[in-house]
C-alpha cells in the first residue's frame, strides 16, 4: 500500500458491526483497516491547501496504480479513477484540500505544516474513498462501473467541483454520492436527508467612495459612514420583506472598514459579508434583487459605489431516490438504525455543482466518539474517531452497489 506508513499499533480501528456482505468487503477491511487509518494519518500530517494538493494527488494515484487501477490525473491537482466496467456508472466523491488554520491538538499525527490543517475531515474523506476503491477492486465482479473522484479545492470559490466537471469527470455518470464528516453524530450513524442538506452561499463586497470632508459640514459632502450604516442595517431588513421567510435566507456582514479620524468624513469604505439561502429557486433570484435594493438604499446618500456579488455554490439538493439508496447503504454498512435524519446546514458545499448535472446525495458520517465534548469542523481542535473510517468505506461501497443494481 503506497500511501500507508507503518500501521500504528494502538490505532482504534475496530469496526462497529460487521455489516452486510458481500464477503469481499469484509475480507478487504479485515486485511486493510490498519492501512485505512495510516492513510488518513499520513494525509492529516501533511495537509495541502486548495489547488496545491500535489503530494496528496500523487500518493493517491500511486496507491490506486499499485492495486492495478488506472487513475487519470486532472489538470492541476486531483484525479479520477474507474473501477469495474459496464454501461452504467456511479460516482463517489471525496475532497482533498485542507484549511488555512493552525491545528491545536496533541495528536501524534497532527499537522506538520505551519498554518495548514485538515480541520474539516477531508483527510478522512480521501482515505475512505481510497478504501472504497480498493475494496471494489478486490471484488470478483461489479455490476457496473464506479468512478472515484478525488476533488481538489472544496474550501475555496469557485470550487474544485467545477474543475472536475470541466475535465469531463462526470461524463457518463448516472448518479453520484459523497459523505462528509459530522462531529454532531456518533460513530455508527449516517445522517441522510431528501432535499436540500446544505445552503447556497454568495459573497458580497460593497466599496463606497466619497469626496470626503469635515464632519462639521456633512451637507457639503457625501457622508460615507452614514451610507455604510444604511446598508448594514437596511439591506438585511429589506431582504426579510422581499424574500420568502421559509427560504432560510440570511445576510450577515463579516467586515466593515472606513476612516481613521473622528472628525473627518472618509473617502473610501468597504463592507463585506455572506448571503446564504436554503432554496435553489431563491438563490437564482438574489443577485438582481440585492443590486436593486442597494441602489435604492444608496441613492439618497450621494456616495459612489461598486457592488461585487460573487455567486458561490448552489445548495446540495439530494434527490429522493439517491437519498433512499444512501440510507439503505448506511443500514447495510452499520446495521439497523444506522441511517438517521439530519437537518439542513446553512453552510455551503460545492458538491452541489455535481447535482446540477446528475442526481445524487450527500450524507453525514458520524465521527464523534460519544465521550467528551464535540469539537466542530473548522475548529483548530477538531479530530475524529477513526472507527468511523471503515463504516464510511462500507457505506460508500454499498451506495455504489445499490445504485448500480437499481
Image (spheres, grey):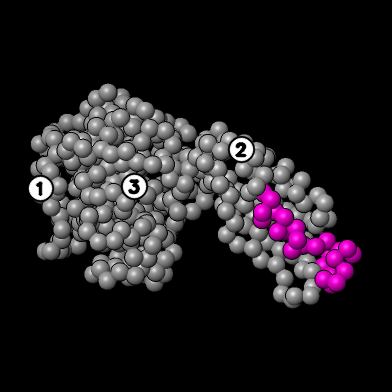
Specify whether 182 is left or right of 209.
left
Instruction: State how many labels appear.
Output: 3
**Precedes in sequence: disc 2 or disc 3:** 3
Secondary structure at badge 2 equals loop
Q: State the CA–CA distance, disc 1 to disc 3.
A: 24 Å
In this rendering, the answer to whether 311 lies above or below 119 is: above
Asked which quadrant contains residue 191, the reply is top left
Task: Single out the mark in the foreground, 1 or 2.
Answer: 2
Q: Is residue 35 magenta?
A: no
Residue that carries the numbered disc 1 in the rendered image: 30
Are the residues tagged 2 and 3 within 8 Å (C-beta)? no
Are the residues tagged 1 and 3 within 8 Å (C-beta)? no
Residue 374 in percent (x, y) is at: 30, 58
Residue that carries the numbered disc 3 in the rendered image: 180
Secondary structure at badge 1 equals helix
Residue that carries the numbered disc 2 in the rendered image: 243
Span shown in magenta: 210-235
Amino acid at each position: 500500500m503506497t500511501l500507508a506508513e507503518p500501521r500504528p499499533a494502538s490505532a482504534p480501528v475496530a469496526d462497529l458491526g460487521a455489516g452486510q456482505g458481500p464477503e469481499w468487503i469484509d475480507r478487504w477491511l479485515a486485511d486493510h483497516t490498519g492501512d485505512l487509518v495510516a492513510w488518513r494519518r499520513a494525509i492529516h500530517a501533511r495537509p495541502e491547501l486548495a489547488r496545491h494538493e500535489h503530494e496528496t494527488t500523487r500518493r493517491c494515484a500511486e496507491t490506486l496504480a499499485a492495486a492495478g487501477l488506472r487513475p487519470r490525473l486532472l489538470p492541476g491537482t486531483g484525479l479520477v479513477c474507474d473501477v469495474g466496467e459496464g454501461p452504467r456508472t456511479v460516482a463517489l466523491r471525496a475532497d482533498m484540500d485542507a484549511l488555512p488554520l493552525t491545528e491545536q491538538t496533541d495528536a501524534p499525527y497532527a499537522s506538520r505544516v505551519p498554518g495548514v490543517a485538515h480541520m474539516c475531515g477531508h483527510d478522512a474523506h480521501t482515505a475512505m474513498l481510497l478504501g472504497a476503491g480498493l475494496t471494489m477492486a478486490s471484488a470478483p465482479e461489479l455490476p457496473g462501473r464506479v468512478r472515484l473522484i478525488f476533488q481538489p479545492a472544496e474550501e475555496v470559490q469557485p470550487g474544485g467541483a467545477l474543475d472536475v466537471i470541466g475535465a469531463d469527470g462526470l461524463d457518463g455518470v448516472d448518479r453520484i454520492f459523497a459523505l462528509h464528516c459530522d462531529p454532531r453524530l456518533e460513530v455508527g450513524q449516517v445522517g441522510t436527508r431528501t432535499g436540500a442538506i446544505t445552503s447556497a452561499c454568495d459573497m458580497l463586497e460593497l466599496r463606497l467612495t466619497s469626496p470626503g470632508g469635515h464632519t462639521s459640514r456633512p451637507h457639503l459632502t457625501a457622508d460615507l459612514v452614514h451610507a455604510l450604516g444604511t446598508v448594514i442595517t437596511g439591506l438585511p431588513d429589506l431582504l426579510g420583506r422581499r424574500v420568502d421567510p421559509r427560504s432560510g435566507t440570511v445576510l450577515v456582514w463579516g467586515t466593515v472598514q472606513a476612516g481613521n479620524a473622528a472628525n473627518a468624513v472618509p473617502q473610501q469604505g468597504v463592507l463585506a459579508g455572506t448571503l446564504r439561502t436554503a432554496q435553489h429557486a431563491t438563490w437564482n433570484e438574489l443577485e438582481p434583487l440585492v443590486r436593486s435594493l442597494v441602489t435604492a438604499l444608496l441613492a439618497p446618500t450621494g456616495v459612489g459605489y461598486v457592488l461585487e456579488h460573487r455567486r458561490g455554490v448552489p445548495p446540495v439538493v439530494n434527490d429522493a431516490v439517491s437519498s433512499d439508496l444512501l440510507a439503505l447503504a448506511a443500514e447495510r454498512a452499520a446495521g439497523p438504525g444506522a441511517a438517521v435524519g439530519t437537518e439542513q446546514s446553512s453552510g455551503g458545499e460545492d458538491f452541489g455543482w455535481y447535482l446540477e448535472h446528475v442526481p445524487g446525495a450527500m450524507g453525514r458520517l458520524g465521527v464523534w466518539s460519544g465521550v467528551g465534548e464535540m469539537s466542530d469542523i473548522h475548529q483548530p481542535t477538531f479530530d475524529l474517531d477513526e472507527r468511523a473510517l471503515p463504516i464510511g468505506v462500507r457505506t460508500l461501497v454499498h451506495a455504489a452497489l445499490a445504485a448500480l443494481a437499481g
